[in-house]
Amino acid sequence: MSELTDWAYPLAESLLAEPLPRRWAHCLGVAERARTVALILGQDAELLEAAAILHDIGYAPDLAKTGFHPLDGARYLRDVASADERVINLVAHHSCAWMEAEARGRREELESEFPQESAHLNDALCYCDMNTTPDGTPTNPIDRINEIAGRYGPESLIGQFIRRAEPEILACTSRVLERVGAAKRQPM
């Protein structure tokens, strides 16, 4: 680890490990997935890993202000933790957050406060999140989407959002896997 991840891991742990141990396990798993795609990110690999460990801090009881965890987490990182702007933006927009923001009537608020990072980084964070179970173990995006829809219920806001986001989540995963495959085929 280096400076950014040395800072991010203890921060995420302090916010999630005790009040939300399962969420903490998920974030550890997402960060582990981030390390598996580092080869396609170059200098942004550490940035992705830091965003991965922090992506769900908005669920922490002390941070949950709006009930929309990407926004709550990003605001905390910006206003309290003085985090790296790119990490903040990745947390704010992780895993098709704009679609959930739209369903909550918060899309303009999200997008006016936090610009999106590059598509390849947003894809990578979505890939990592949607290929990790709530307990932090590897999964695939179909099973993850089904798990989320089942946990919240198909008629809930989250259930409807995740089904609406499913094509984009699968496209993100496909783009990341294509880039990983191409990187592995490159001669040394």
Image (spheres, helix red, strand yellow):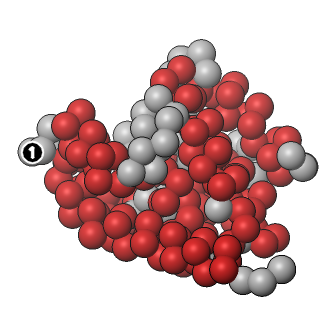
Can you see residue 134?
A: yes
x, y percentage for residue 104? 27, 55
Circle 1: residue type? Glu
Depth order, front residue of 178/30: 178
Left or right, 167 with reference to 36:
left
Query: In which quadrant is the C terminus drawn?
Result: bottom right
Left or right, 84 with reference to 112:
right
Considering every residue shown, the one lying at the far left of the view is 155
Identify which residue is drawn at 51% across, 77% down.
178
Depth order, front residue of 65/23: 23
x, y percentage for residue 25? 56, 29
Depth order, front residue of 68/44: 44
Identify which residue is drawn at 34% across, 59% down.
101
Q: Secondary structure at mark 1?
A: loop
x, y percentage for residue 126? 48, 60
Identify which residue is drawn at 52% across, 71% down.
176
Residue with the mark numbered 1: 155
Q: Height in image: 7 above or below 51?
A: above
Identify which residue is drawn at 75% across, 42% down.
8
Considering every residue shown, the one lying at the far right of the view is 3
Left or right, 177 with reference to 170:
right
